[in-house]
């Protein structure tokens, strides 16, 4: 199958946006994108990358190709030099977008001006475990009458189950809180309604730390 020059140009023009999209998609927590959403975001990220690259190189006065880039966009001419330099800029666009998403800058600004109470795009499970203060946790397995105490290593979620990996784990009997055994690491996979996670309440008194089990999600 032969590819026309215009189709080839379109594919190459999407490289900067696709590169930024891949970085953003790999580093942020969100539901899997559809092909349409990926292409839409690639066009958005690509446009931003071309605009930033054009401004930077025009200010520096080192590249004249950006001045004619938008005028020649409908033609079949392929601006390899512009695509390459915009691809380099797109790496920083992807990283910057990841930072904006991770630190919830848009949501924080919206809350600051009292436009929204939304905390972000990810589900509450990921939002809870991503919080800086969430490290040491208690996990209740009511079905098997067990309680796991450990430190969060990694986690994920699908439509059916929640997955969690804990380090330095101590397993207790759920009813009596009797210590049963200890593990270096454990992988837990539970349905959404059967996983209860609690944060220990840390109360500092006389230089010692007292821990109580509170804050359940």
Image: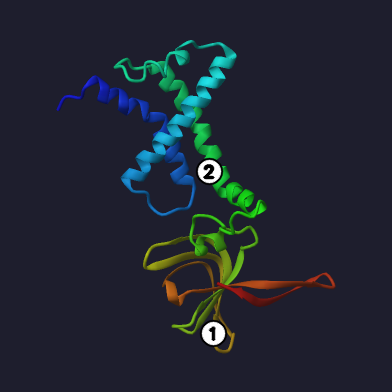
Left/right of residue 119 with respect to residue 71 in the rendered view: right
* Of 59 and 181, the residue lying toward us: 59
The N terminus - image quarter: top left
Residue 164 x %, y %: 48, 65
CB within 8 Å, label 1 to label 2: no
Under tag 2, what secondary structure? helix
* Of 148 and 41, the residue lying toward us: 41
Res 98 label? 2
In which image quadrant can residue 160 be found?
bottom left
Q: Of the residues under marks 1 and 2, which one precedes in the sequence?
A: 2
Q: Which residue was labeled with disc 1?
A: 173
The C terminus - image quarter: bottom right
Left/right of residue 33 with respect to residue 165 in the rendered view: left
Residue 10 x %, y %: 31, 26
Label 1: few (<14), some (14–19) or many (≥20) C-alpha neighbours in 10 Å: some
Q: CA distance from mark 1 to mark 2?
A: 41 Å
The residue located at (26%, 25%) in the rendering is 7
């Amino acid at each position: 199958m032969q590819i026309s020059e215009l189709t080839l140009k379109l594919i190459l023009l999407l490289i900067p946006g696709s590169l930024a999209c891949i970085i953003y998609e790999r580093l942020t927590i969100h539901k899997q994108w559809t092909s349409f959403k990926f292409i839409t975001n690639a066009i958005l990220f690509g446009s931003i990358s071309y605009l930033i690259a054009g401004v930077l190189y025009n200010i520096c006065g080192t590249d004249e190709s950006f001045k004619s880039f938008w005028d020649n966009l409908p033609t079949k001419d392929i601006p390899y030099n512009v695509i390459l330099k915009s691809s380099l800029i797109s790496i920083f666009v992807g990283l910057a977008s990841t930072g904006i998403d991770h630190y919830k800058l848009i949501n924080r600004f919206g809350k600051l001006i009292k436009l929204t109470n939304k905390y972000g795009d990810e589900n509450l499970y990921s939002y809870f475990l991503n919080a800086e203060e969430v490290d040491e946790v208690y996990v209740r397995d009511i079905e098997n009458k067990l309680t796991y105490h450990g430190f969060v290593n990694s986690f994920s979620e699908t439509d059916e189950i929640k997955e969690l990996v804990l380090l330095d784990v101590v397993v207790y009997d759920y009813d009596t809180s009797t210590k049963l055994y200890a593990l270096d690491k454990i992988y837990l996979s539970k349905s959404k309604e059967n996983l209860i996670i609690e944060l220990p309440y840390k109360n500092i008194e006389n230089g010692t730390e007292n821990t109580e089990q509170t804050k359940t999600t």
